[in-house]
Image (cartoon, helix red, strand yellow):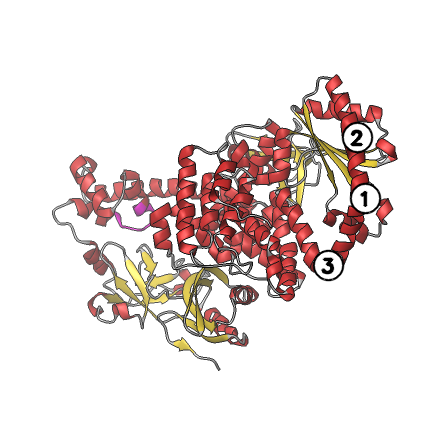
Amino acid sequence: MKKEPKLEDLLEKLKNNLSEEDLQEIKRAYEFAYEKHKGNYRLTKEPYITHPLNVALILSDLHVDKVTIMAALLHEVINNSDTTYEELEEQFGSEITAIVKNISTINRLELPDDKESSAIYLRKVLVGLAEDVRVLFIKLADRLHNMRTIWAVNPEKQKKKANETMNVLIPIAHRLGIYSIKSELEDLCLKYLKPEVYEDILKQLDATIPELEEVLEAMQDSISEMLMEQGIKFKIKSRVKSVYSIYKKLSKGKKWNEIYDILALRIIVEKESDCYLTIGLIHSKFHPLPKRFKDYIAMPKENMYQSLHTGVFGIDGKIFEIQVRTHEMDEIAEKGIASHWSYKEQGTKKIQNMMEQKLEMFRNMIDSYKETTSALDFATNVNTDMLGDLIYVFTPRGDVVELPKGSTPIDFAYRIHSRVGDTTVGAIVNDEIVPLSYELKENDVIKINTNKNSTPSKEWLDFVKTTAAKNKIKSYFSKQDRIDYISNGKNILERELRKQHLSFNDVFSEEKLTKILKDLKMQEMDDIYLAIGSLRYTALYIIKLSTEEKQNVTDALIEKVSNKNKLIPKNNNKNAIVVGEYNDILVTLAKCCKPVKGDPIIGYITKGEGISVHRKDCVNILDKEERLISVSWSDNEENEYFSDIFIETLNDKNYLSEIINKASTKNISVVSLNTSDNNDTTLYNLTIKVRNSNELHDFLDSLYSLSFVKKAGKNNACLFTKK
C-alpha cells in the first residue's frame, strides 16, 4: 500500500533549491491548509490535505518558485473550506491570493460536451482567465493528481474528465513544454478512455520487458564505453516507449513489429558541441536509419524543446531511438517554461533566448489583459500568440525567433526590440525586399532596415499579428498624444495668462503651485498642462485656483453650462455625451448605475471631477436637483460600455461554461465574474461590455433560452423576468 505523503517529503525535495526562510513560509502555508481541510476526506478515503500536498510535490519536480508551491498548498481552501479571500490575503499577501483566486475560478469550468469546438473554446477561456502562467502549472499538477486517483469516481465521470484532460489540458501542457506532466496525463487518459487498448499494449510490453531491458543495458554499456574513451562527461537514461506513444503508432496503421523506437536512450552531456560529437561517435559504430536524424538544437520545437534525435540499428539488430542533449536542454524538455525558475540565472544563450521569448509572450498576454479588461479578448490573444500555430524564422546571424503563424516583419522587429520596431522602415526576407505587411513563412531569414528618425505608423495596426507589437505601437502613440496634449496645454495656458495680464511666476509661485497640485491630486506642472491640453480643465479655472477670486470647481462648471438651451448639433460632437454648448468638460459615466448608450440619462455636477452621467432612475441623484443638468447621447459615437448584470440559476451543477458560451455567441465580452450559492440557486454576477442598451436587453433576453436560468437582469435595475 502506498504511504501517504508528508510535509517532510516536500521540504526534503525543496531544500536544495529554496532557502530555509522559504521553507518556513511553505510550512506555514501547509499548516494553514491542514487546519482548513481538517475533517474533510477525498473519495479515495484519504484526508483532503493529501491532494494539495501531492500537487505541491508534483510541482517540486519542476523546480518552481516558493510562491507557486505555497499557492498549490492553498489552492483548494476557498472552494473547500470557509476561508475568505480577505483572510488569505491578510495571511499570505496579494500575489498568492491572486493565484488562488484564478485557480478557484478556472476549477469551476467544465467541458460541456465532446465537440472539438467546445474543447478549443474552453482551452481559450481557461488560458485567458489564468492571469499568471503559474496558475496553469498548478492546474496541470492538480489534474495530474486527480487523474492518478480518478479510479475512485464512477466510470462516466472518469471518461468525462479523461476526455477534458486530453482535449483541453494536454495541449496546454504541450505548449508550455512540460513533457513530464504531459506524458503521464496521456497514459492515464488512454487508460480510462480506451481501457481494453491500454491493457493490451501493457500486456505486450510486459511480455517483452525482460528481454528489452537486457538489450537496453547492453546498448547503454557499449555507448558508455565509447564516450568514456573520448573523455566526454555524460549521463545515460534508458526507457521503453510510453503506452500512449505506442498507441499513437498503432492507431496510424502500424503493426507491433513495425514500431522501431520502442527502445530509447537519452544521453545528457555538458556542452552543445558534445551533442554533435556524441551523435557522430554513435553513427560511426551503429548504422543509422535513413531520414531519422533530427536537429532540434538548431531548429527547436515550438515548446522550446531542443535535442538531437537519431535512430540506429543497435545490439542484436534492435532499433534504438537515441536523444542527445545538454543538462539545460533536458531540464527544459521535461519542465518546459516552468524550468525558467530554476535556470533563470543559468543556461546556454540559445536556450535562454527561447525561454525568454516564451515568457515574453505571457508577459505581453498579461499586459493585454490589463489594457482590454476583457477575459475573452485576452483569451483570443492567447489563442493567437500561444496556442495557435507557430513558425520559426531567423535573424541574419542565425538566431531563432518564434512567432505566431501569419506574423509580419513588424512583428519580428518588435520581438527583437521595441526600438527596432519603432524605427523600422523596410524589410528584406531571403535577400528580397518585401512589404512590411508580408506574411512570414517557416525558415525565412529576415533583415530589418531602420532609420533612427523614423516612427511607427498607425496603419501597422491593420496587419500586425502579435499582441506585443500591437501593444507597443499603441503605447508609442499614447506617449505621443501625451506629449502633444502637454504642448497644447502649455500654449493654451500661456495665452490665457496674457489675456488676463498675469505673470506665470506670480500665478505659479512655488507655494501656489504646491497647493494647486495638492488640490488637483497631481504630481508636477506637466500634469496641469496635460489636464488643460486634454480639455479636462480650462486654463481659466486653473488660474483662478491660485488667485483670490478663485472659484470652486462646481461653480466653474455651473457657470460653464449655465446656458442649457444651446445644444451643439450632435453630428459635430466627437464625445459620447453632449453637454450644453461645450465639448471641453470632463464627463464620466457613473460607476453606481453604469449607464449604457440608449438609457435615459442626466448629468450631475460633481466637486472637482467634472460631470458624472447617471441613469435617470439612479437612486444616488434623486435628491440632487440643484446640481443636475441635461445631457444626451451622441449619435455618431460607437463606444463600448461596462454593465453589471446578475444571472440566477439552479444550483444542481456549475453553469459557468454555458453562460460564457452564450455571451460569446452574442459577441458580448465578459470582463469579470463571481458566484455565490444560496439554498437552491446559484447567483452569477458578471460585468460585461456592450455597445448599447438594445444589445444588453437582447443578451439578457437570450439567457432565458437556457433551461437552468431562473432570473436575469441588470444590477440596481428593474428585474428581467422570464417570458
Frontmost of labels 2 and 1 is: 1
Q: Label 2, secondary structure: give it.
A: helix
Return the mark for residue 208: 1
Return the mark for residue 560: none
Near-viewer residue (664 or 316): 316
Frontmost of labels 3 and 1 is: 1
Is residue 293 left or right of 391 when viewed as pictured?
right
Return the mark for residue 194: 3
Q: Callout 2: few (<14), some (14-19), or many (20+) C-alpha neighbours within 10 Å?
A: some
Is residue 577 left or right of 206 when viewed as pictured?
left
The earlier-in-sequence mark between 2 and 1 is: 1
Q: Residue 244: x and y, percent?
A: 73, 49
Residue 685 seen in the figure: yes
Residue to which mark 2 is pinned: 219
Q: Residue 598: x and y, percent?
A: 41, 70
Q: Quadrant of residue 237?
A: top right
Alpha carbons under labels 2 and 1: distance apart: 16 Å
What residue type is disc 1 on? Thr
Near-viewer residue (437 or 495): 437
Q: Residue 76: x and y, percent?
A: 46, 55
Is residue 175 left or right of 66 when viewed as pictured?
right
What residue type is disc 2 on? Met
> Residue lying farthest left?
548
What residue type is disc 3 on? Lys
Alpha carbons under labels 2 and 3: distance apart: 33 Å
Start-end of magenta stretch? 531-539
